[in-house]
Image: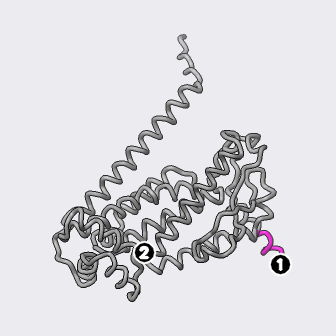
Amino acid sequence: MNETPAPPPPTESNAQSNAAFANNRQRLWLLGLILLAFALRVYRLDAQSLWYDEGVTAEITQRTLADLTSWTARDIQPPLYYYVIWLWGRLAGWSEWSLRFPSVFTGVLTAPLLAILAFKLSRIRRAGILAALIAALHPLLLYYSQEARMYSLLTMLGVLMGVGLLRGVGMEGRKGEGEKGGRGERGKGRALCWSLYVVSATAALYTHYFAFFLLVAFMLYVLFLFLSRGPIRNSPRHRVTLSPFPLSPLHPFSSTPPLLSSSTSPGSSSCSPSSPPTPAIGRAALSCGKRCATC
């Protein structure tokens, strides 16, 4: 009686090729969602005439730069968005389609940035794809991406702040990350992440003052990490250390406060693949729950 030969065991090269195929497929999904977001935002972009607030944008940005700066100094809105439209209008014109296109551009950028943010939080690529899908189809994001106002730019900068902050505090949780480069390279990478956060936070504050509330939320997040630094420091994956980079640009001329960043311990490569490390935020929440349970 002939026996069916057993299939050969999967080799390392096959596993790598399957992973590469999955990554390429997810990149195609993300690219398709970006194109979908663009198509939905440019569809009938100039179907309606400018309403009052958009008319204010059109009128103010056609003034001289000095008059524009003087007007925004007396108004309730910061000047960054108007500076962008002031430059864009002189390059592309002052039609409804042209005035609204910068909001389309920042609205489309929000989709991949939100995908990155979701992936950094969950370490699941499908979560990033789902976040990009939500950003592409969300009615409010679509609405403000077709309006000649600063809200689409503010949303994009807020998501960019979150990406920079997560990377700055070292929540990526990549296995063996500490072995890829020396301390100098990790320090440069951390500096770039904090710089991204500070630049995007400053730009958000100069776009709309409501960005202050988002900064407060991020400060509370970092404060939570600081208060729960015990379980994070004792973990084999991450240690909370002091960093010279500022948390927010609210006091740029004051002495730089010590802030939180992350460094990977040298022994991180000894983690067992069968038991992946819990993210630091999860360990902190678990520790707080155990403390409350013993109260």
Look at the image and tell me in which quarter the C terminus lies.
bottom right
Q: Name the dominant secondary structure of the magenta segment.
A: helix
Q: Is residue 37 depicted above or below 292 in this figure?
A: above
Q: Secondary structure at mark 1?
A: loop
Please check the rendered image and state whether residue 263 is part of the magenta-colored stretch, yes or no.
no
Q: Which residue is mark 1?
A: 295
In the depicted structure, whether residue 195 falls above or below residue 5: below
Q: Residue furthest top?
A: 1
Tell which of 234 and 66 is nearer to you: 66
Across and down, in percent, residue 229 comes to 77, 65
| Mark 1 surroundings within 10 Å by alpha-carbon count, few (fewer than 14), some (14 through 19), many (20 or more) | few
- Residue 236 pos. (x, y %): 78, 50
4 sits left or right of 263 in the view = left
Res 207 label: 2
Q: Quadrant of the N terminus?
A: top right
User: Disc 2 or 1, which lies upstream in sequence?
Assistant: 2
For the point 59% across and 27% down, the residue is 12
